[in-house]
Image (spheres, grey):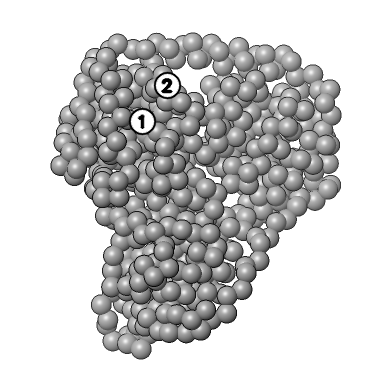
Amino acid sequence: MQGTGGELLVTALQRLGIDTLFTLSGGHLFPIYDGCVKHGMRIVDTRHEQTAVFAAEGMAKLTRRPGAVALTAGPGVTNAVSGVATARANGSPVIVIGGRAPAFRWGQGSLQEFDHVPLMAPITKRAITVTETDRIPDEVDAALATAVTPHRGPTFLDVGVEVLAGFAEAETKPSAPAVRTRADRPDLERVARLIDGARTPVLVAGTDVYFEEAWEEMQHFVEKARLPVFASGMGRGTLPADHPLAFSRARARALDGADVVVVAGTPLDFRLRFGDFGGAAVVHLVDAADSRAAHVELAGSAAGDLRYTFGALADLVSDDADRGTWIDDLREEETARRAADRADLDSDAEPIHPARVYGELDEILGEDAVVIGDGGDFVSFGGRYVTSTRPGRWMDTGPFGCLGNGLGYAIAARLVYPDAPIVLLMGDGAFGFSGMDFDTLVRHGLAVVAVVGNNGIWGLEKHPMRALYGYDVAADLQAECRYDLVVEALGGHGEFVSAPGEIRPAIERALEVGIPALVNVVVDPAVMYPRSSMLV
Ligand SMILES: Cc1ncc(C[n+]2csc(CCOP(=O)(O)OP(=O)(O)O)c2C)c(N)n1
Ligand SMILES: [Mg+2]
């Protein structure tokens, strides 16, 4: 086709299935916007580039297809660094496009002249500058192909404003499908033998089980092998929470008592005891060879398409393993812990116990709701108490642990699911990173409900610092700050809640009002989420 660089870029994205571009304005991007207007690409403009990146990552997480974001030169790109690093840590396919100061003036000090590529290279799978207008379609193609090839992740390209404004004729050729590899047969046979010989095995289903759409094959495999399953990250809901082999509360007991721990589709990082489960043999099932843990002595592993891996393992494992007692023990533990949780979930305490918010949400939300977490302790309670019966309906920031993902993910969730309830769980501290993007929700008519657990502190930091030092600093926020009024000022709906009985009616009103809403729930700052240190 013929057109400006901006048009070539937009049509290349469209050919690859992208229909929305997240952005924040800057002159270096005008030819791209012109391409969007001429070719019908939806533009969603945010109030901070970080939110734009999180929205693009949110699209990727929700659709398992790449999201796209365009950032203006210099500070537009540098503002996006934490979001891009988050997408990298999550293995989310995102194409990040940067504007760029013109090459013909490079070195003379143009506005926002900055070489983004060395900054982006360590946090993306591929970072390049496109220097010729007619190269744009092929480079967009390559960026997308790299982003969706396992192990997935963000890619970056920047294009000089003169290259975007230039005119060219470029061939458009269909892109090659993503390269899929299959695990080696001997690796699969070894894993199957380990599982057949195990008395107390456990499977952890992680994010890539979701990204690889491997959950049906996984379910078939665990049902045949009788493996109890725990979820991690976006693996939540890949085995529905009400499945007889799905567990969550019995996790510590399971990992302590397991003789074989099979970890699928997630790294052996701090969330999984760095792969050290006492004497248990560790099996790592990964999407690509370079995802295999190098810091753990693995008893077995298989790298490649996880659908194929689970399918092959289902054929190879025997179906007569007797794991009745093990699974019954775990179920007993699970049931006992769930019963013990009720005291907090139903708590009438004032100030409100944060878990009470989840006791209420559990009654309100159906299985189609998308629940997003952005915060510390308050969101950790959510991670424990929100039930996931479907994959892809729970989104948190992931192992990079970056506060500020909330509004971006919420924007994406409303765009992907126009009719499902979208609930954003936020700490009061977390609100500060992206709260202004309530304006984006209002301008674009995206009704989501944020529920803020307002404890007036950076709770996840204050409590541990006190425990370690006997005092704390830099951990206090304003008590009972009216974030609900901030949202009202931005054109949304606000609710302020300080008694447990008010929680449900306030959330129900917020879900029905049809505009973006924030329910500001004052919760007890003395309640901390029980956890051991996550730092080492
Ligand atoms: C960008 C960023 N800055 C700082 C931190 C460190 N951090 C982790 S949790 C947390 C406290 C979060 O406070 P809040 O959102 O109010 O939730 P709470 O723990 O009080 O429920 C902080 C500051 C982080 N994870 N990300
Ligand atoms: Mg807080």
How many dots with numbers? Answer: 2
Q: Is mark 1 within 8 Å of ligand 1?
A: yes
Q: Nearer the viewer, mark 1 or mark 2?
A: 2
Cα–Cα gap, marks 1 and 2 = 18 Å
Given the image, on which type of amino acid does mark 1 rest?
Asp
Given the image, on which type of amino acid does mark 2 rest?
Asp
Is there any visible trace of residue 370 in the rendered image? Answer: yes
Residue indicated by mark 1: 377
Residue beneath the point at 41% across and 19% down: 363
In the rendered image, the vertical position of residue 212 relative to residue 477, given as above or below = below
Mark 2 Cα-neighbour bin, 10 Å: few <14, some 14–19, many ≥20: some
Residue beneath the point at 46% across and 43% down: 398
Q: Specify the quadrant of the image occupied by residue 488.
A: top left
Is there any visible trace of residue 455 in the rendered image? Answer: no
Residue beneath the point at 63% across and 17% down: 330
Q: Position of residue 303 (x, y in %)?
A: 71, 50
Residue indicated by mark 2: 362
Judged from the image, the secondary structure of the residue bearing numbered disc 1 is helix
In the rendered image, the vertical position of residue 21 relative to residue 291, given as above or below = below
Q: Specify the quadrant of the image occupied by residue 515.
A: top left
Q: Position of residue 292 (x, y in %)?
A: 66, 49
Residue beneath the point at 57% across and 75% down: 172
Q: Position of residue 445 (x, y in %)?
A: 30, 46
438 or 331: nearer the viewer: 438
20 or 320: nearer the viewer: 20
Q: Would you say 282 lies left or right of 71 here? A: right
